[in-house]
Amino acid sequence: MADSINLEALSTRSGFNSAVRHIQKTMEIASSAGAGNISDIIYEMDDDELTGGKIALLLRMLLVDKLGYKTASKNLTSTIEDVSVLAKEFGKWTGVDLIAAYYHPEMGLLIANPKVAEELAAFGQLRKRELMVIYAGLQGKETDENCQKAANIALTLFEGSKVTAPPALTKGKFTVKKVSKPKAASEAKAAKTKTVKAKTETKKAASTKKAAAAGGPAKMTPRYAVVVQNELFHNGNVEAWKRIIASYKAKHPNLEVFIFYETERILDINSLFKWGKVKHGSAIEFAVAGNEIQDVAKLQRYLAQGASHQFEAFLRGPVNTVLNLF
C-alpha cells in the first residue's frame, strides 16, 4: 500500500515528467552541495518550478541526509516586521553555514541564507505561531556541537532577542557571497515569454495557481494599509473592491492579491461588510504576491477610493464586465 501511494504520481505522463524534472534539478543542485550555501544556489537558479513543496524535499535530502546539518525549529512566539537587518549579525558567523526556512502562511515554504539581506527580505513579516526551521552545518565536513548551538541561537535572533554569538561561530571560511540572479537566463526567459505570450496566457494563470498550491510565489510585498473613509465599509465598498481586484488580476494574471483585517487573512471580501465591524478610520491591509510585481501604488490608490464615498465610480457598467483600470 505504501509503495503504491509513493509511486502514484508516476502513473501519469505529466506526473512522471514532473518527477524527472525534479530529479534532474535535484542532481544539479546536489552537484554544488558542499561547495556553497544551498539557499544561494537556489536563489541564483531563479527557477519557477522550485516551489515550497519541492524545496522542502531538497532540504531534507541534501542538508540532513547527505550533509548531516543540525536543525532547530520553533513556532515563533512574536511577530517581526523586518528580519533583513539580521543579515549583518549573521554575516559575522563565518564558522558555520546557515539556511533559514520559514513557512509563510500565504506563500508556503520560503528559504534564505540569513547572511544575505536580499534573501531575508523575501520573508517579509514573520508572523507569530508560524514555523521557522534553522539548518546549520559545515558544507560536507562533519558537524559538531557548535552547529547545533548556531541553529538554536539563530532561532532566538529571529524572535527578536539579542544574543552574542560564541567566538567559535565567528571564525571560519563561511563568508558572505554576493548573489545575483543570472542575467542571461532572465533575458532568455523574458524573450521566450514575449514570443509565446498570447498562446500561453491561460496556461500561465493555471501554472501560477499550481505553484501557489505547491508552495506559493517567490515574492510578496509588505502589507499596505487602506483606511476606510466611509462611516462603514458597506456593500458598495465591498463590490468596488471586488471589481478593482478583478481588474488588477485581469491585467496581471500571474499575481495574487491578499486582503487582511486585524492581522487575519480575509478569504471572502463580503465578510468585511457582513461583520459590520469595519468602520470609519479602520485599516484594511493588502499585499501582492508573485513574480515581477507591478502597479501596486495604483492598486492602493484605487482601493483607497473604493473604501471612500467615491466608490460608485467602480460600479458603473454591466455587472459582469471587467474594468480597464490598469
Image (cartoon, rainbow, N blue to C red):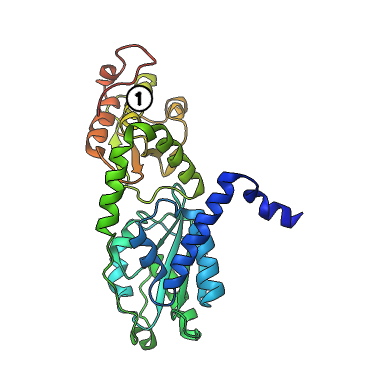
Residue 176 visible? The answer is yes
Classify residue 298 as left or right of residue 63. Answer: left
Q: Is residue 192 above or below residue 47?
A: above
* Figure label count: 1
Using the image as rendered, state which of residue 121 and residue 212 is in the foreground.
212
Residue 72 point in image, percent of width and height: 51, 71
Residue 138 point in image, percent of width and height: 44, 81
Residue 67 point in image, percent of width and height: 51, 77
Q: Is residue 37 above or below residue 258?
A: below
Q: Is residue 315 above or below residue 12?
A: above
* Residue placed furthest toward the right: 1
The quadrant the N terminus occupies is: bottom right
Identify which residue is drawn at 45% across, 75% down. 136
Residue 308 point in image, percent of width and height: 27, 25
- Which quadrant holds residue 155? bottom left
Residue 131 visible? The answer is no
Q: Amino acid at mark 1?
A: Leu
Using the image as rendered, state which of residue 136 and residue 253 is in the foreground.
253
Q: Mark 1 highlights which residue?
A: 232
Q: Secondary structure at mark 1?
A: loop
